[in-house]
Image (tube, grey):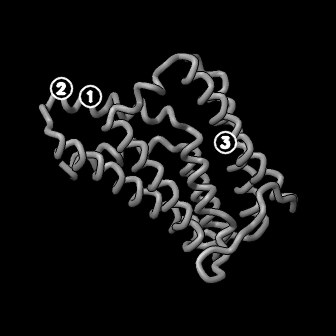
Amino acid sequence: MIIKGFKLGMMLQLAIGPVCVFIFKVGGNEGLIAAEFGVLGIVLIDALYILLAISGIASFVDKGRVKHILRIFGAIIVAIFGLQIVLGTFGWEVIPNVKLFDGIQSKNSFLEGLVLTASNPLTILFWVGVFSAKITEEKLTKKDVYLFGTGSVLATLFFLTVIAVTGSITRYFLPVEVISMLNFIVGLALVYFAFRMFIKKA
């Protein structure tokens, strides 16, 4: 069942989203360690959302007005991250840097990963749909559901680690100007994701 969850998780990761471009950007600018801090933050929130989905707490989020408010809030958060990256290419800082774990400069990548992933709590509803379908179609037990969720979380960890490694490799052979341009594009991509979240109908 873990394998099934992993396969589904990998399929979902192929739909490139804001967290993916964020991890690639961190890997390219700050290296693998900082990017992995970001991955850890993302995985923790994903795991939390899956647990909430399994426990049924997501029924609160499914209310129309709550969904609308959360979507707008999420769009604002993603837009802020996008603008931060865009302005960062010109040397301006929006979110201050902090040091984590004995002076390793992470530039808040762990916290940013947490916030960026948490900015889309409607993900819980997606997982509710997935688990409901699986329970109905395959008659999964509670244990099977948790194993399936574990596989999905492991897929997130694996895929984003690959993205982090890929991003960190680029910093060794791409000119600074090219990396700066990539950062600018990533920032614009996040703003675009935010715009789509904002205009999406309930």
Q: Look at the numbered disc 3 and give the secondary structure of its residue.
A: helix
- Residue 78's disc is 3
Give the SS element for disc 1: helix
Mark 3 residue type = Val
Q: In the rendering, which numbered label is found on residue 136?
A: 2
- Which is in the foreground here, disc 1 or disc 3? 1
Q: Nearer the viewer, residue 58 or 12?
A: 58
Q: Is residue 100 left or right of residue 79?
A: left
Residue at 63% across, 74% down:
100
- Residue at mark 2 to residue at mark 3: CA–CA distance: 34 Å
Q: Residue at x 72, y 56 (%)?
A: 183
Can you say whether 23 is above or below 124 in the image? Answer: below
- The location of residue 189, given as percent across then percent down, is 67, 43
Q: Can you tell which quarter of the image residue 23 is in?
A: bottom right
Where residue 91 appears, x then y in whole percent?
A: 87, 62
Tell me the kind of residue under disc 1: Ser
Q: Residue 136, image x and y in percent? A: 18, 26
Mark 2: secondary structure: helix
- Type of the residue with mark 2: Thr
Q: Earlier in the sequence, mark 2 or mark 3?
A: 3
The residues tagged by marks 2 and 1 sit, at their Cα atoms, a distance apart of 6 Å
Alpha-carbon neighbours of circle 2 within 10 Å: few (<14), some, or many (≥20)?
A: few
The residue that appears at 22% across and 32% down in the rendered structure is 134
Relative placement, left or right, of 105 versus 51 is right
Cβ–Cβ below 8 Å for labels 1 and 3? no
Q: Is residue 169 above or below residue 84?
A: below
Q: Residue at x 71, y 69 (%)?
A: 98
Quarter of the image for residue 173 reads: bottom right
Q: Which residue is mark 1?
A: 132
